[in-house]
Amino acid sequence: MMAENTEIKNRIRLGGIDENNFFEACALSVREEQKAFVAPPVGIVARGYVYRDCGARVFTILLDEKVVGLALVREFTDEPLGYDLQQLLIDGQYQNMGCGSAALGLILDILRGERKYPCVEICVKKDDSAALHVYEKAGFTDSGYVDPDCPDSINLILRF
């Protein structure tokens, strides 16, 4: 298993979203039971546009040259300052291969390297055990904050 994850890690890279890969990205799909945990791909791309004044970035997650996922990061523009990892989606066919963990590592490397903010936060549904495992493995911990609009979620934070 470890050799497979290392091989996948070496084949994952991040890209942008543009007219050349928009339809491929929007065709991504998670498993039926995961649809309550993540926005549909077109919603992720739309949020990137809506949050453009907050430094939003939509990343395509590529395995070799195939789009297998999307991620959305924006900046908190009020206190506390930091990054907000709003969405991380891996197509159902490519889950449990290490693609999500590898992509998360690349995203965190970019954010850490910018040295603009001291932390990144993410809000995860308590029932999404697979996502919680990925984030905790990457070093995220419970921030202790409970969003009154999302009481069924855990707010995780990773300090750089």
Image (cartoon, helix red, strand yellow):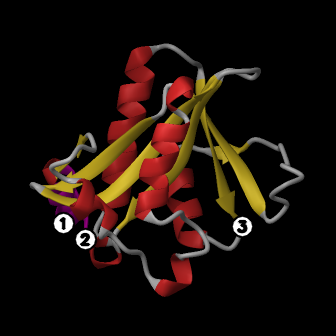
What's the magenta bit mostly, secondary-structure-wise? helix
Q: Which residue is mark 1?
A: 4
Where does residue 79 sit, x and y in percent of width and height? 76, 20
Q: Are marks 2 and 1 in contact (CB under 8 Å)?
A: yes
Farthest residue to the top: give it: 115
Q: Quadrant of the C terminus?
A: top right
Disc 1 element: helix
Q: Is residue 121 left or right of residue 38?
A: right
Residues at marks 2 and 1, CA–CA distance in whole angstroms:
5 Å
Q: Quadrant of the N terminus?
A: bottom left
- Rendered image: mark on residue 1: 2
Please state which amino acid type lies under the numbered disc 1.
Glu
Residues at marks 3 and 1, CA–CA distance in whole angstroms:
29 Å
Residues at marks 2 and 3, CA–CA distance in whole angstroms:
27 Å
Q: Earlier in the sequence, mark 2 or mark 3?
A: 2
| 111 and 28: which is toward the camera | 28
Q: Are marks 2 and 3 in contact (CB under 8 Å)?
A: no
Please state which amino acid type lies under the numbered disc 2.
Met
Vertical arrangement, residue 28 with respect to residue 10, above or below? below
Quarter assignment of residue 94: bottom left
Q: Residue at x 32, y 69 (%)?
A: 28
Q: Is residue 83 left or right of residue 21?
A: right
**Magenta range:** 1-9
Quarter assignment of residue 107: top left
Q: Residue at x 26, y 40 (%)?
A: 16
Q: Which residue is mark 3?
A: 126
Q: Is residue 139 left or right of residue 5?
A: right
| 59 and 24: which is toward the camera | 24
Q: Residue at x 75, y 60 (%)?
A: 153
Where does residue 38 sit, x and y in percent of width and height? 54, 64
